[in-house]
Amino acid sequence: MHKMIGRVSLLVCLMASCCQSLDQTITLSNGRKMPVIGLGTYRATGDVIYNSVLTALDVGYRHIDTAYLYDNEKDIGRALKHAFSETKIKREDVFIVSKLWHTFHSRPLVTEAIEKSLNSLGLEYLDLYLIHFPFGLKEGTNETTPVDPQGNVLFSDVDYVETWKGMEDVLSKGLAKSIGLSNFNHEQIDRILSVAKVKPVINQVECHPYLNQKQLKDFCSERGIVLTAYSPLGTGRLLNDTVVLEIADKHNVTAAQVLIRYEAQRGVVVIPKATSRKYIEENFNVFNINLSEEDMKSIDSLNQNLRYNVVDYAKKNKYYPFNLPY
Ligand SMILES: NC(=O)c1ccc[n+]([C@@H]2O[C@H](COP(=O)([O-])OP(=O)(O)OC[C@H]3O[C@@H](n4cnc5c(N)ncnc54)[C@H](OP(=O)(O)O)[C@@H]3O)[C@@H](O)[C@H]2O)c1
Ligand SMILES: *[C@@H]1O[C@H](CO)[C@@H](O)[C@H](O)[C@H]1NC(C)=O
Ligand SMILES: *[C@@H]1O[C@H](CO)[C@@H](O)[C@H](O)[C@H]1NC(C)=O
Ligand SMILES: *[C@@H]1O[C@H](CO)[C@@H](O)[C@H](O)[C@H]1NC(C)=O
Ligand SMILES: *[C@@H]1O[C@H](CO)[C@@H](O)[C@H](O)[C@H]1NC(C)=O
């Protein structure tokens, strides 16, 4: 009898470990495949990001995350152009994501905005276009963050539901293959879903063990929306966490690898940003790490709903997303 139970649990064990194997891509609700690990590119411009993108493609990344805000679409475009002409990598092999900035929220401006991004990137289409945040800023200036003479940020009152219609326009024009959201809370997602002709496939949000987004992840998952984790290393601030380091030691990997694998293993797309070859390689090399259920639970228990990207200036705006628990 004991032997029998032993065998059954061994079998369960084997099955469980087999389910931990990680696919390189996740299938979105529209049937398109998105690579689980992407290169984050915020705060890197010029030749730095040009080289990082080429390194990442060389290492095996097939997903690049950028935004109009990051002011690096031209440099990423240069890198892609180089890769498409000098390597075997083709446009259709790479999943490229950009985001609609706050000053382009009215419906007709969405098309203008994506055309700007496409023009900078030197591309015909994006694989995924996201509304960067639910609130809008004053339109028609060339400022990314327009302010009045006193320095107060100037908002627009465009409802993100109107913006979503603009997102559906760029989808139907073929300028983006998929459309989604970023920094939306669950009520805002449901408002979008109540009017959407096309559902968002992604919500990209800050996500790491100190803000693991369990509720939002479950909520989105019930609606066929996949989460993308931004700042998965807590912008570097989680790399010295004792629990993460212990697990890393046990598996002979780095803290960054544990943090990235954690997200991927729970079905979350993850976009660590790195500029050096060492980090870029390390962050991609997580497909052969198997965190145990116990490891996953220990990491889950680190949650403290600690958000780093609070966006203070928008706290009083009616569309500010972070006043709700999730
Ligand atoms: N949708 C949004 O509102 C939003 C907001 C924030 C970020 N994002 C996206 O998410 C991406 C990632 O988030 P993030 O850039 O905020 O932070 P992150 O990926 O959590 O951390 C990046 C920092 O960690 C360092 N790092 C990377 N790999 C490392 C490693 N293996 N060991 C030690 N240090 C390492 C990087 O160094 P180096 O820079 O020196 O290489 C950088 O300082 C962004 O780049 C952006 O694409 C989106
Ligand atoms: C992790 O699990 C997969 C699937 O069972 C297996 O192929 C791989 O060798 C394991 N990796 C490690 C490092 O144990
Ligand atoms: C914005 O910049 C463009 C190009 O530099 C310029 O043609 C346009 O007049 C500017 N618009 C405003 C409102 O400043
Ligand atoms: C990690 O480092 C930060 C500052 O660099 C510090 O505030 C924090 O206490 C450290 N955490 C641990 C667990 O050592
Ligand atoms: C631990 O990882 C390093 C770097 O990947 C490798 O060189 C070393 O052989 C590994 N040690 C063990 C015990 O697996």
Image (cartoon, grey):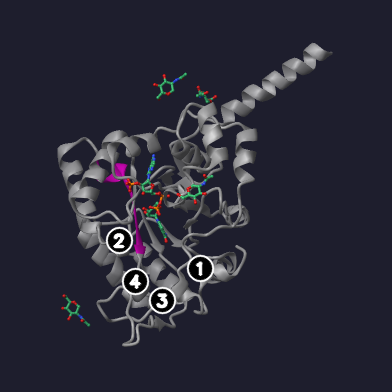
Gap in Å between the C-alphas at discs 1 and 2? Answer: 28 Å
Callout 1 amino acid = Ala
Q: Are marks 4 and 3 in contact (CB under 8 Å)?
A: no
Chain-order first, disc 3 or disc 1? 3
Which range is magenta? 90-99
Q: Quadrant of the N terminus?
A: top right
Gap in Å between the C-alphas at discs 2 and 4? Answer: 17 Å
Give the labeled residue for mark 2: 70
Above/below status of 72 relative to 282: below
Give the labeled residue for mark 1: 196
Give the labeled residue for mark 4: 110
Above/below status of 85 relative to 113: above
Please rate how many residues cluster around mark 3, counting C-alpha atoms within 10 Å: few if below 14, some from 14 to 19, many from 20: many
Task: Indicate left or right for 244 with 146 as reference.
Answer: right
Please rate how many residues cluster around mark 4, counting C-alpha atoms within 10 Å: few if below 14, some from 14 to 19, many from 20: many
What residue is at 26 percent from the left and 35 percent from the top?
58
Q: Secondary structure at mark 1?
A: loop
Gap in Å between the C-alphas at discs 1 and 4? Answer: 16 Å
- Label 3 C-beta lies within 8 Å of the nearest ligand 1 atom: no
Mark 2 or mark 4: which is in front?
Answer: 2
Chain-order first, disc 4 or disc 3? 4
On the image, the x and y values in percent for residue 232 come to: 46, 48
Q: Is residue 203 visible?
A: no
Chain-order first, disc 3 or disc 2? 2
